[in-house]
Image (tube, grey):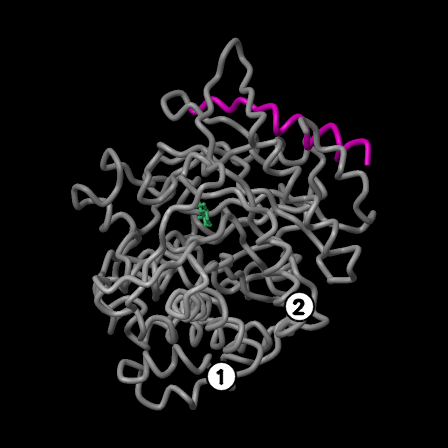
């Protein structure tokens, strides 16, 4: 399928948007921003491909009007972006950077002027360097500083936000960054990872508490979900996959919606859990207004005696993959969202807050022909439509991403955008996928 006409079949109040994040696009060398732990991580050779970082990124700090125009011109009705903590508070706390306030004021005003609903995110991974040096998310004080930062955002911007997420992808903040070591701060330490698996949820809970004191009623959290399948039918593989599913998905669902952690994993983690963690569970499980799901792929899990703590690891599958090497498996989106709704989130709205693919895109005669991406969106939107038909309350879908951007440890080598970015000239070139969204959204 090489078009996105399927969009016309969605309910008229369904929101279509695009998503981005501060560090990946803004360029944190602009506007007196402080640095974050990604700047520190990127300084060590080998952590990020080509030793790149987000200091220039897509120069969105300068080009934000052009970027908002692109979103509005495509016919999207919502924009998911994130606030940069170190831009607003260069030292993480204390003195507020007036240039940052002015930037987000202008950004929000621009969105509203273009009839875009602002979906803000408080934390999309740019932890101020000052806190990285104090133990980062392992330090429970960071959760309190996060609450103070939340208060500043609420005071300055909540009048213009349509919706607010606390944390983007707590699994990535904790497990991927502290056990697998792939993201900042790059630890490979089971004790750190397990502590962070709890602290990041505590940070979410503390932020929710602050958000409620401002009487704000459209707040949630964004979870990244991955379908976990066993390698084969053996009992070993089945058990490995079920624990992996708990770590990736159910740890967060159970904590947020039921105020507890899943039993098999908790047993494994027990010895490293923060003291008295149980007393935080009410705060973590206070009510939220919606939940976001980011979905990209599935993982196949096989028991692996060489893996020192878990005893299992992922193996390659045989489905077609994206440029990230991630298998394309839209069925996983349908299954995971349905399970979340039935077992955990029940009647609250679900937003697909990220979905999309990296593709080896290039501009040829002014055109970027990303047919594979159009097909990826089409096959995933088909599943979203099926969920709606099955009365699962999915209320919106955000394509990841508006722009090619800083793809974390992959630097600028992976292109997820609907719009191509030339990182030398900063020229934006809408891809064929952008025009397909535009065609369908405008004629909806
Ligand atoms: O680029 C990231 C984003 O920051 C978080 N979700 C996954 C995307 C693709 O890897």
Residue denoted by label 1 = 260
Task: From the viewer's perspective, tell me whether residue 373 is left or right of residue 8.
Answer: left
Q: Is residue 437 part of the magenta span, yes or no?
A: yes
Residue denoted by label 2 = 341
Q: Residue at x 37, y 69 (%)?
A: 236
What x and y, as percent, mark residue 287? 61, 78
Q: Is residue 115 above or below residue 323?
A: below
Q: Residue at x 82, y 49 (%)?
A: 11
The numbered mark at residue 222 is: none
In the foreground, 232 or 289: 232
Task: From the viewer's perspective, tell me whether residue 144 is left or right of residue 293.
Answer: left
- Dot 2 lies on which element? helix
What x and y, as percent, mark residue 161? 63, 57
Q: Is residue 250 part of the magenta span, yes or no?
A: no
Quadrant where the N terminus is found in the figure: top right
Q: Is residue 401 above or below residue 14?
A: above
Q: Residue at x 29, y 50 (%)?
A: 38
Count up the numbered dots: 2
Q: For the magenta stretch, what is the residue range?
A: 426-444
Is the residue at mark 2 in contact range of ligand 1, meaning its CB lies under 8 Å from it?
no
Q: Is residue 279 above or below residue 120?
A: below
Q: Residues within 10 Å of mark 1 (few under 14, many from 20)?
A: some
What x and y, as percent, mark residue 62? 46, 34
In the foreground, 90 or 295: 295
Q: Residues within 10 Å of mark 2 (few under 14, many from 20)?
A: some
Looking at marks 2 and 1 on the same chain, the residue that comes earlier in the sequence is marked by: 1
Task: From the viewer's perspective, tell me whether residue 134 is left or right of residue 252.
Answer: left
Q: Is residue 177 above or below residue 54?
A: below
Q: Give the CA separation, mark 2 to mark 1.
A: 17 Å
- Dot 1 lies on which element? loop
Residue at the far front in the pictured view: 234
């Amino acid at each position: 399928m090489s078009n996105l006409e399927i969009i016309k079949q969605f309910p008229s109040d369904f929101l279509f948007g695009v998503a981005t994040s501060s560090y990946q696009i803004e360029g944190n060398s602009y506007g007196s921003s402080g640095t974050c732990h990604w700047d520190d991580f990127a300084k060590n050779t080998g952590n990020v491909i080509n030793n790149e970082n987000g200091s220039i990124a897509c120069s969105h700090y300068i080009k934000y009007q052009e970027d908002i125009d692109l979103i509005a011109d495509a016919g999207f009705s919502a924009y998911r972006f994130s606030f940069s903590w170190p831009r607003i508070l260069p030292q993480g706390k204390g003195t507020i950077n007036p240039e940052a306030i002015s930037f987000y004021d202008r950004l929000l005003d621009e969105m509203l002027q273009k009839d875009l609903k602002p979906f803000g995110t408080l934390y999309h991974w740019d932890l101020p360097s000052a806190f990285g040096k104090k133990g980062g998310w392992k330090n429970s004080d960071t959760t309190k500083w996060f609450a103070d930062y939340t208060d500043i955002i609420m005071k300055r911007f909540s009048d213009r936000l349509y919706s607010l997420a606390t944390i983007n992808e707590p699994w990535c903040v904790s497990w991927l960054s502290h056990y697998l070591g792939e993201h900042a701060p790059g630890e490979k330490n089971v004790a750190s990872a397990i502590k962070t698996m709890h602290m990041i949820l505590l940070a979410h809970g503390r932020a929710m508490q602050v958000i409620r004191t401002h009487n704000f009623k459209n707040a949630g959290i964004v979870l990244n979900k991955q379908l976990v399948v066993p390698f084969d039918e053996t009992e070993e593989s089945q058990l490995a996959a079920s624990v992996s599913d708990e770590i990736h998905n159910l740890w967060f669902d159970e904590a947020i919606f039921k105020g507890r952690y899943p039993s098999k994993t908790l047993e494994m983690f027990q010895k490293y859990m923060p003291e008295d963690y149980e007393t935080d569970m009410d705060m973590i499980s206070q009510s939220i207004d919606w939940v976001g799901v980011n979905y990209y792929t599935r993982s196949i899990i096989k028991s692996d005696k060489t893996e020192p703590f878990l005893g299992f690891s992922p193996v390659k599958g045989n489905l077609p993959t994206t440029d990230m090497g991630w298998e394309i498996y839209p069925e996983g989106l349908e299954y995971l969202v349905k399970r979340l709704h039935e077992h955990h989130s029940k009647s609250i709205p679900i937003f697909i807050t990220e979905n999309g693919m990296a593709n080896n895109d290039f501009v040829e005669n002014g055109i970027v022909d990303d047919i594979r991406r159009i097909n990826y969106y089409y096959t995933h939107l088909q599943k979203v439509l099926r969920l709606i038909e099955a009365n699962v309350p999915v209320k919106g879908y955000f394509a990841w991403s508006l722009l090619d951007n800083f793809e974390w440890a992959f630097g600028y080598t992976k292109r997820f955008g609907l719009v191509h970015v030339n990182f030398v000239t900063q020229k934006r070139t809408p891809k064929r996928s952008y025009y397909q969204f535009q065609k369908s959204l405008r004629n909806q």
